[in-house]
Image (spheres, helix red, strand yellow):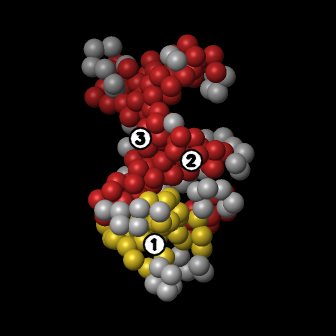
């Protein structure tokens, strides 16, 4: 098995935040003085480029989803290449284009520093968390798309009542969000439903 790395692109301040908050974790980001590299994981040395591109796309979606939740006004990072370090110090890899797309930036309360590491770690272990963070990190933040994320969280917890009882968000805020998202009268064509 070989460690594959992705060269990250994005706002320098955001790359520094990720580097700082993921230091010492299994989701290591290193900085060589000019560029930031994120450890994607161990894969066979002869891994196919399409498999690596898929892994890069999934990993970036998780990282961006977690970081958008964790940091106020985080715009996202991207990458165009993955590579491995050879024993002679050279790099071997593949290049492709993967960009996060988002138009709405949400402001969320401050969270503990370890939150980002915990979310990325949890996403790597739990498919529902991976799906929620991936959607949150790649889809435009519309009422319909955010509703999908809430549905995933509900499903993972066991249902709507389990989310409402979790205490993560006041239950009235969740109910208000859902009523608004479903209301054609309030949102018009942006509503999740056309008949309510």
Q: Position of residue 173 (x, y in %)?
A: 57, 23
Which numbered tag is attached to residue 135? 3
Task: Tell me the element at label 1.
Answer: strand
Q: Position of residue 195 (x, y in %)?
A: 28, 14
Residue projecting furthest to the right: 112
Left or right placement of residue 109 versus residue 78 in this view: right
Displayed quadrant of residue 20: bottom right
Q: In front: 104, or 3?
A: 3
Which residue lies at the image location 32% right of the left edge and 30% below the top edge?
Answer: 190
Q: Name the residue under label 2.
A: 120
Which residue lies at the image location 31% right of the left edge and 64% below the top edge?
Answer: 49
Q: Which of marks 2 and 1 is in front?
A: 1
Q: Earlier in the sequence, mark 3 or mark 2?
A: 2
Q: Quarter holding the C terminus?
A: top left
Q: Which of marks 2 and 1 is nearer the N terminus?
A: 1
Which residue lies at the image location 63% right of the left edge and 50% below the top edge?
Answer: 117
Q: Name the residue under label 1.
A: 84
Cα distance between the residues tagged 3 and 1? 28 Å
Q: In this view, does 129 lie above or below 40?
A: above
- How many C-alpha atoms fall within 10 Å of the one at disc 1: few (<14), some, or many (≥20)? many
Task: Tell me the element at label 3.
Answer: helix
Q: Nearer the viewer, mark 3 or mark 1?
A: 1
Q: Where is residue 169 in the image (x, y as percent from the top left)?
A: 62, 26
Q: In front: 130, or 149?
A: 130
């Amino acid at each position: 098995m070989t460690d594959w790395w992705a060269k990250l692109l994005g706002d320098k301040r955001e790359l520094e935040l990720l580097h700082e908050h993921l230091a010492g974790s299994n989701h290591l980001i290193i900085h060589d003085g000019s560029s930031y590299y994120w450890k994607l994981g161990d894969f066979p040395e002869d891994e196919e480029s399409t498999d690596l591109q898929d892994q890069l796309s999934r990993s970036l979606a998780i990282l961006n989803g977690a970081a958008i939740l964790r940091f106020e006004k985080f715009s996202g990072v991207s990458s165009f290449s993955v590579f491995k370090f050879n024993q002679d110090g050279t790099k071997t890899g593949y290049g492709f284009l993967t960009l996060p797309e988002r138009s709405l930036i949400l402001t969320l309360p401050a969270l503990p520093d370890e939150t980002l590491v915990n979310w990325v770690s949890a996403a790597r272990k739990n498919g529902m968390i991976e799906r929620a963070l991936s959607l949150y990190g790649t889809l435009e933040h519309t009422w319909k798309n955010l509703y999908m994320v809430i549905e995933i969280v509900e499903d993972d917890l066991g249902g709507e009542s389990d989310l409402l009882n979790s205490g993560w968000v006041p239950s009235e805020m969740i109910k208000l969000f859902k009523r608004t998202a479903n209301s054609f009268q309030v949102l018009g064509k942006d509503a999740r439903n056309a008949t309510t």
